[in-house]
Amino acid sequence: MPRLLTAALTVVAAAALAVGAALGAVALLNAAPEQPNTPLVTYETAPRER
């Protein structure tokens, strides 16, 4: 029985650690400043001829 209890506590601790890491990663991504959405390359369009 002690081995089963130890295994169950290990699973619970691992799950709590995984949830904490996921929430931490989301918090870090939300803390990053918003990047401007500007294209690196622009192409000039030729005027249409009629």
Image (cartoon, rainbow, N blue to C red):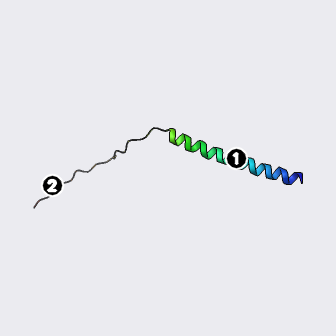
Residue located farthest toward the left when viewing the structure as drawn? 50
| SS of the residue under disc 1 | helix
**Which disc number belongs to residue 16?**
1
- Residue 17 position in % (x across, y down): 69, 45
Residue located farthest toward the bottom when viewing the structure as drawn? 50
Which residue: 61% across, 47% down?
22
Which image quadrant is residue 47 in? bottom left
- Residue 32 position in % (x across, y down): 49, 39
Between 17 and 46, the one lying in front of the other is 17
Q: Residues within 10 Å of mark 1 (few under 14, many from 20)?
A: few
Select label 1 or label 2 by which is in front. 1
Which residue: 26% across, 51% down?
43
**Which disc number belongs to residue 43?**
none
**Which disc number belongs to residue 47?**
2
In which quadrant is the N terminus drawn? Answer: bottom right
Pointer 1 and pointer 2: residues touching (CB < 8 Å)? no
Left or right: residue 13 compared with residue 24:
right
Q: Residues within 10 Å of mark 2 (few under 14, many from 20)?
A: few
The amino acid at mark 2 is Pro
- Residue 37 position in % (x across, y down): 37, 45
Which image quadrant is residue 33 in? top left
Determine the CA span between mark 1 and mark 2: 61 Å
The amino acid at mark 1 is Ala
Q: Between disc 1 and disc 2, whose residue precedes?
A: 1
Which residue: 65% across, 47% down?
19
Which residue: 11% across, 59% down?
49
- Residue 24 position in % (x across, y down): 60, 42
- Asked if 50 appears above or below 12 in the picture, the reply is below
Left or right: residue 37 compared with residue 12:
left
Between 47 and 27, the one lying in front of the other is 27
In which quadrant is the C terminus drawn? Answer: bottom left
